[in-house]
């Protein structure tokens, strides 16, 4: 985890900016931060020369990280594990962001999806992951879509980490279209 602290902070800052976008300033209040644009108001007998930042809406985002651990990724396992650690460290404490990570391997129409972490699993678990096999990316994307749909957040984001060598490009296209239509 210490190897990925810088990257984790970058991920965290990126997703925390979402919270800033969902807030706004309220002006003309009797309490709060001094509003330099309304400093004339006390001379007019108006006490509304303060401002306050209010949250308009809380972020509601489910992020799924899907990691390819097939045979073609065998030389990249250290990068796969670091990627999982970066997202886990960066997203686990952000309010309004639900996060889950899975890795996958299998055969063309059969996929083995392994949960690495989510809200119920407070630690990143990389031990005991099946590695090798084929790359059923289409089936993995479809399965991850179903798992993301179970999360209560309104918006969903699926990040797919792979070397780009799926067993079937047609299955991947079909799964991506299903994700976009949802």
Image (spheres, rainbow, N blue to C red):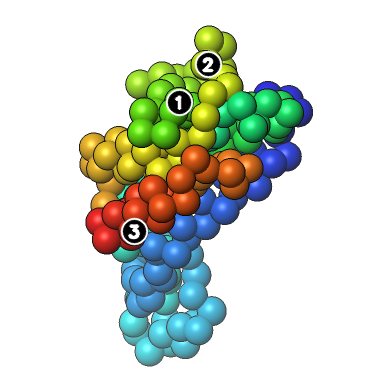
Relative to the observer, which residue lies in front, 12 or 171? 171
Q: Residues within 10 Å of mark 3 (few under 14, many from 20)?
A: few
- Outermost residue on the top side: it is 128
Q: Is residue 66 above or below residue 17?
A: above
Q: Is residue 61 above or below residue 69?
A: below
* CB-based contact (under 8 Å), mark 1 and mark 2: no
Q: Is residue 19 left or right of residue 4?
A: left
Mark number, residue 145 = none
Q: Secondary structure at mark 2?
A: loop
Give the residue pinned by disc 1: 106
What residue appears at the point 52 percent right and 57 percent down from the top-left corner?
Answer: 17
Residue 176, image x, y percentages: 38, 54
- Horizontal side of 145 relative to 102 (left or right) equals left
Residue on which the image places disc 3: 177
Q: Secondary structure at mark 3?
A: helix
- Badge 2 local density, few (<14 within 10 Å), some, or many (20+)? some
Work out whether residue 91 can be spotted: no
Q: Which mark is residue 129?
A: 2
In percent of width and height, residue 19 lies at 44, 55
Q: Is residue 128 visible?
A: yes
């Amino acid at each position: 985890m210490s190897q990925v602290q810088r990257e984790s902070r970058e991920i965290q800052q990126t997703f925390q900016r979402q919270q800033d976008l969902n807030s706004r300033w309220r002006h003309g209040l009797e309490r709060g931060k001094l509003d330099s644009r309304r400093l004339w108001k006390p001379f007019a007998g108006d006490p509304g020369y303060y401002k306050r930042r209010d949250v308009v809406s809380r972020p509601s985002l489910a992020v799924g990280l899907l990691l390819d651990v097939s045979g073609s990724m065998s030389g990249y396992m250290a990068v796969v594990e670091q990627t999982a650690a970066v997202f886990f460290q960066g997203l686990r404490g952000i309010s309004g962001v639900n996060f889950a990570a899975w890795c996958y391997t299998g055969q063309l129409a059969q996929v083995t999806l392994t949960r690495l972490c989510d809200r119920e699993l407070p630690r990143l678990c990389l031990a005991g992951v099946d590695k090798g096999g084929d790359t059923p990316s289409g089936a993995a994307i479809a399965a991850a879509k179903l798992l993301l749909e179970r999360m209560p957040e309104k918006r969903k984001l699926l990040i797919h980490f792979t070397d780009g060598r799926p067993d079937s490009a047609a299955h991947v296209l079909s799964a991506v279209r299903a994700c976009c239509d949802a």
